[in-house]
Amino acid sequence: MQAIVLAATSPAQQSSLVPKNVVLFYDDYPTRKDPDFQVTREIVRPLVAHLDRSGRATDWMFDSFIFYSVYLYYDRGPSQTYISSWIRYLFRAGKQASNLDAIVGELKSELQQETFQLNVFLSVAVPIEAVEADRIIKNVDKMLDEWNSLNPRHLRLIGFYWGFTEGLRMGDSRELDRAVPRAVADHLHARSLKLLLIPSMSQARRYVGEFHSLGFDYVTVQPNFATKSDGDLSRFELADQMVTSGNADGVEFETPLDVKWPGGDMLSNVNTYFAYAQLYGWNENLMNTYYHGSAISSMWRNSNESYRAAYETIYQFILTTQ
């Protein structure tokens, strides 16, 4: 299937409490080997705003941003010691949150849209040694305290991302106690905050119909086409069935740069995802999430025309989601 460029119907993004296009931003703390995984001006500007070839901001890009660490996923064994250190890195030592706030402020001036605020999801941090609601909630409250102390001018906290697992299953045999995410969701809801989950296709199929009842306000399913070796295009149909049935609110677009993955190369993968997005009308989803890794920023920076075309394909789709 060939990608079809989607025509813009309105300005890309307006400041809104409702997240429509959410970028999942990984960091690699504490290794910090790859600058693409850190909140810096070079990496974040092409995500918050659409940039032309000269680097000039022309419009908003993603309306929402998830702070997440690859070491918070359950199979990395996130200890409470690591979590405490990551929170300090996010708000103090690494200044990731304040860096984002400053970048958004700069772009607001460039675009002359001073009322804009970027929506933010922090990540629920789960200590592997105690997958218990009270321990998790303490970490949530610590991050809320840090957020309130920072008091960012250009960011709006709207919720937390559950990135510890991609569903209820950990590995081959262990399952989460369903009371744990339910308690975390209740704690967030009492503070007018939302809980977001991005399940893999296998997790979504295993637990179909459960996620919203457990308190996950937003669920975007991963087709996993880009990350599986089977090249099975029916994954897009399955993802759409979950959206149309109400079991998911949208999909995650996986835009990797690794040419070893199905689709042949980066541009082919991107075109495939967005061609199916047009086929199924995913621009009308409640929300969609976008796997960043280092891909989307790299698309804009790269001088290769195919990379730039991929960046424009994402932007053109965002334009239609108003």
Image (cartoon, helix red, strand yellow):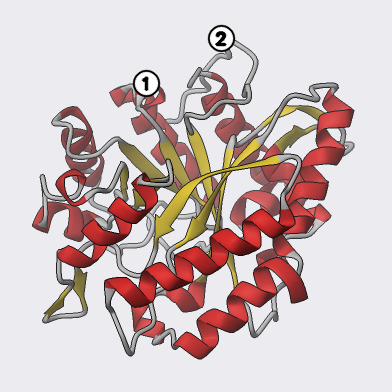
Residue at the (66%, 76%) spot, across then down: 88
Query: Is 222 left, or right, of 140 in this rendering?
Result: left
Q: Is residue 262 above or below residue 113?
A: below
Residue 47 image position (x, y, % from top left) = 67, 44
Q: Is residue 125 above or below residue 253?
A: below
Q: Nearer the viewer, residue 299 or 107?
A: 107
How many residues crowd mark 2 within 10 Å: few (<14), some (14–19), many (20+)? few
Query: Is 254 left, or right, of 213 in this rendering?
Result: right
On the image, which quarter does residue 175 sit in? bottom left
Residue at the (76%, 48%) spot, across then down: 101
Q: Which residue is mark 2?
A: 9
SS state under label 1: helix
Query: Is 37 left, or right, of 178 in this rendering?
Result: right
**Amino acid type shown at disc 2:** Thr
Residue at the (81%, 54%) spot, across then down: 42
Residue 223 image position (x, y, % from top left) = 29, 48
Residue 54 image position (x, y, % from top left) = 89, 36
Query: Is 228 left, or right, of 148 in this rendering?
Result: left
Sequence order check, earlier mark of 2 and 1: 2
Cα distance between the residues tagged 2 and 1:
13 Å
Q: Is residue 19 above or below residue 12?
A: below
Q: Which residue is mark 1?
A: 284
Asked if one can make out residue 220 in the rendered structure from this viewpoint, the answer is yes
On the image, which quarter does residue 118 sit in? top right
Asked if one can make out residue 28 in the rendered structure from this viewpoint, the answer is no
Residue at the (88%, 29%) spot, across then down: 110
On the image, which quarter does residue 86 sit in? bottom right
